[in-house]
Amino acid sequence: MNLAKNSDALVTFERVTFTHYDRSAPALSGIDLSIRRGTVTLLVGPSGSGKSTLCMLLNGIIPHLLGGELSGKVIVDGHDVAATAVKDLAGSVGLLFQDPESMFATLQVEDEVAFGPENLRQPPAEIAERVTAALDYVGLGALRKNLVWALSGGQVQKLGLAAVLAMQTPLIILDEPTANLDPATTHSVHELILRLRDEGKTVVLVTKDLDEFMAEVDDLIVLSDGKLLAQGAPRTVIEQHGLEMLDMGIWLPEPTEIGMRLALEGRLPTAAIPLTVAEAADAFQGFRFRTQAAPAAPAAPGEVLIRAEELEFAYGGHTKALRGVSFEIRQGEIAAIVGQNGAGKSTLSKLLVGLLKPTGGRLDLFGKPARKWKVQALANEVALVFQNPEHQFLCDSVTEELAYSLLAQGVDDEAEIKRRVDEMLARLDITETASSHPFALSAGAKRRLGVATMLVGGRARLLIVDEPTYGQDRRLTERLMELINNLRREGITVLMITHDMRLVDAYIERALVMADGCKIFDGAPGALFQSPEIVERAALRPTSLRRLVDALRGCGVEVPDGLNTVQAFIKAMV
Amino acid sequence: MSEQTLAYIDNNSIIHRADALSKVAWVLVVVIATFQFQSSIARGIMLLALLFLAVFVAHIPLKAILKVSPLIFGVALLLGIFHYAVTKGVTPLFSIGSFVVMKEPLEDGAAFFFRLAIMVMASFMLIWTTDIRELMTGLVRLGLPYRFAFAIFMALRFLPVIQQEVDAVRAAHAIRGRAARSQLSHRIRLWQRYLFTVIVNGLRKAENTATAIESRGFGAYPDRTYVKDFRWSVSGILLVVVFLLFGIGLIVLERQHLL
């Protein structure tokens, strides 16, 4: 915070407090901070901590477009934000929005990149050069004539980044650019960010959780409830505030979390808390590991719910989204479908709920060929929780929403409906919002309501959850996983589609790995992470905990199998 | 990946390469000619010409045309039937059992069917084959302030976004099952929700987009530069001329009682 008067500061906040116009509590209060030129800063905090508000203050969207009450002073690249119009800040600040698709204004990739510089009246010849340079930089040069909506999730992020780069602003803000990307693409975005710093740009990267990338950045800013909890070098911030961050629901890299817990128990000096796998392997070499009791053998497999044989699907007769996929899902399993963006994961889930019909091969759902099922009849057997739960809502209150599901399943006794709705509300911890409009709930509550609407009928045997971490911080994700685990204990079969390897390793017994429409692996996550060629082909990345175990073994430390969570790892350390 | 039917179909045909303003002029020529026709034979020939142009010249996939055919032909058919029903007939043509088909209502119904079908089909041709950005730069060339031209552009740009949203909502609703006893009340409820969800999410997206483009310097100056400026194209002008002559030809043939 003493950096505030630093002459090489590109951004300074002085006692900044901001309240959105329809709220009473401030979204940011009393913020003092500074961001130096030529640095990478991570801005981290749980959902609702004020990260996006802070970003919008940097480019003037707040207060100029969204209104609200601002006090204190925000200076960006020499401009007083309160006194400078958004369009005039556009030459200084490039902001990549959380959902880059919504910032696209044109149809073609190259037009999109040219859009910003054109608005700033740059000469066409120069813009053309910038477009080529920016697209080459992010690796989209070959796709410059493509339509923007034909891009994959990862390409959309890269195009957003190229559009920001072409503006040639000194400050670049990236609001959760990797939230929906596969692990390998996330890694390549991180490398891009470091390259930008080497070229003198100042980058602010917003994120809900920290991974090993934090070891590479210059500064960490932690927000909590609109207040600045800490700013400084990552190592210092983690040493001083790591536990608070864990309490807030920010996940830290597993090696860091292990180090912190050990430091708390006095088993590791605070200064030795590792930020990376390599540091952790170094710090933990002195420990021995006891063999864990073998995990309870999975329950005997139940009846087959889903059987796919050489399953194929093609959209509109074009390229095949699925080619020759075979697998079985049995009663009581918990499995995950993983793989890079566009590998066919969502297509597969839509086939399982009957929204799509196979174009080749065989698919039996609950003992009947998929072609013979009607979507609405299938809805009694299988429940799909969409990424955006809003799409599923049909009613004006949470209670009505749950009652609708019961009615749809033929329950029409009012007392019975009320009893089951109340029970579900309590089970999902959303009782206090019973009369709220579903659209007015928080992101986490919406997600839980999405699950509730699918399960309240009590007849579904299979639950499919599409990307449980989407739009939520770790604490909310953990609560959702807790709920899913409870359901599983009640005998419901669970299938998850996710990019989150930590989730897969901690909760899942079986991973189905998809690549280019084919199933390339089907087995336990432990075996998956020990097959480097499959991991690479599917654009996955082993969790840092897995890599830590490998690194320790590489140093001759004997580490038993099955240490798939931080808790298990610490428990095994002697 | 959903099939886009309300959007540009990337084909690079000669029609795609024709400039946007010529294509707007072409739509006007087709529509004006159609309203000059007196017989449904001429109108039918025009409709066939459009279909031929779409399939064999612009290479629009038949699937895309079939997908919007309820919009093109269904609505036109309803309008045709409506006019058949309300037009008073005097000349009996033929009868099916006790049902006598009259000449005037049939002609009137057919006229309205063809007019609407041609108008909608020509508009779809414009949407399918035109990068609307080019339409925008064209309008700016004609003197429209760029912020106004851009408003039109953004409205058209949003069509596929809304379609995606409708598809997603429809899929999500389908798996919720049906809670109403009657099919009709269920349908009505679903439609209310489509509208609500699509409008809420549409507005949210529109607001995000408005904020995002402003932060990319949109509106910073009264004018802006264009990497791809508008240029009239030979194929565009040719398209207009060919259809002008074709329309006039049909009108002349009609007036000579050759059709």
Image (tube, coloured by chain):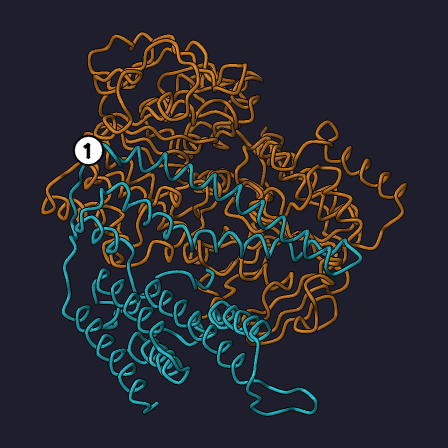
Quarter of the picture containing the C terminus of chain B is: bottom left
Vertical placement of residue B110 versus A146, above or below: below
Few, some or many residues within 10 Å of mark 1 (<14, 14–19, 20+): few
Residue bearing mark 1? B221
Chain A appears in which tint?
orange
Q: Residue A5 falls in which quadrant of the image? A: top left
Residue nearest the viewer, comparing A98 with A292? A98
Residue nearest the viewer, comparing B132 with A182? B132
Please give left or right for residue A373 compared with residue B38 in the image: right
Vertical placement of residue A464 versus B256, above or below: above
Amino acid identity at mark 1 = Tyr
Vertical placement of residue B84 versus A381, above or below: below
Q: Position of residue A194 (x, y in %)?
A: 27, 35
Count of labels in the image: 1
Q: Secondary structure at mark 1?
A: loop
Residue B125 can be seen, yes or no: yes
Residue nearest the viewer, comparing A380 with A199? A380
Residue A269 can be seen, yes or no: no
Q: Residue A10 falls in which quadrant of the image? A: top left
Q: Position of residue A144 (x, y in %)?
A: 24, 56
Vertical placement of residue A145 versus B61, above or below: above
Q: Residue A192 falls in which quadrant of the image? A: top left
Image mark 1: chain: B
Q: Position of residue B17 (x, y in %)?
A: 21, 67
Query: Residue placed at 60% from the left, 50% from the top?
Result: A496
Chain B appears in which tint?
cyan
Q: Position of residue A423 (x, y in %)?
A: 82, 37
Query: Residue placed at 59% from the left, 54% from the top?
Result: A524
